[in-house]
Amino acid sequence: MKQLSIIIVYFMRALSASAQVTFEHFHDPGAEPTMIRLSLGGDKYLMFDGNTQILIFNMDHTIYRDIAVPQYPGYTVSGFPICISDRLFNSDNLIEFGVFYYGNTSKFEVINENGVVLNSVPGYDSPQLFRDPTGHFKLMIAESNNKESVYSLPGSIPCVDRCGTTSSN
């Protein structure tokens, strides 16, 4: 019986040893990672260099999209691009995202992966994405004229599952 116990303990240790955290990939420092879920492309993660480039990766670490964030004289990109999706702002197959720019004036732009500006709003505060009680997505922006503008969006954005959370976005 003692030999059977030793054998069981040996196999349990062997199984638990294979369930360790395993290194998969290294990225250059300085980029901020985040998870996204695309309606067409599924789960991805992205890295933003803080100013000019969004790299979207497949879960096997291959590049899915390399997107240049437009730069304008007199403006600086402020913060991480938001609402990165493929079906929130329109129904084509391109990735779209929102960027807030600071300069002499400030603005929020919705841009697709080809650099085409889909909408530009003069504003001074970070926009907020929310879902109304009927399930439709809205974008609220504090504009430079001290008014809150609300925009209805034609699509939706799937949320990334978070381990251990009790609420959904």
Image (spheres, helix red, strand yellow):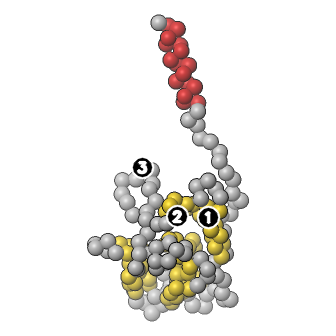
Q: How far apart are marks 1 and 2 (CA)?
A: 9 Å
Q: Where is residue 99 in the image (x, y as percent from the top left)?
A: 55, 78
Mark 2 lies on a secondary structure that is loop
Quadrant in the picture for the C terminus: bottom left
Q: Mark 3, residues whose alpha carbon is within 10 Å: few (<14), some, or many (≥20)?
A: few
Mark 3 lies on a secondary structure that is loop
Q: Mark 3 points at which residue?
A: 164
Q: Position of residue 119 (x, y in %)?
A: 50, 87
Give the residue at the far right of this rendering.
Answer: 28
In the image, which disc is placed on residue 41?
Answer: 2
Q: Are marks 1 and 2 in contact (CB under 8 Å)?
A: yes
Q: Position of residue 47 (x, y in %)?
A: 62, 64
Q: Where is residue 132 in the image (x, y as percent from the top left)?
A: 32, 74
Q: Is residue 11 above or below residue 26?
A: above
The quarter of the displayed image where residue 10 is located: top right
Say which label, 1 or 2, has the lower sequence index: 2
Q: Can residue 72 be seen in this view?
A: yes
In the image, which disc is placed on residue 7?
Answer: none
Q: Mark 2, residues whose alpha carbon is within 10 Å: few (<14), some, or many (≥20)?
A: some
Looking at the image, which is closer to me, 7 or 102? 7
Looking at the image, which is closer to me, 106 or 1? 1
Q: Which amino acid does label 3 sit on?
A: Gly
Q: Which residue is drawn at 67% across and 51% down?
A: 25
Q: What residue type is labelled 2?
A: Gly
Give the residue at the far bottom of this rendering.
Answer: 145
Q: Name the residue under label 1.
A: 64
Q: Are marks 3 and 1 in contact (CB under 8 Å)?
A: no
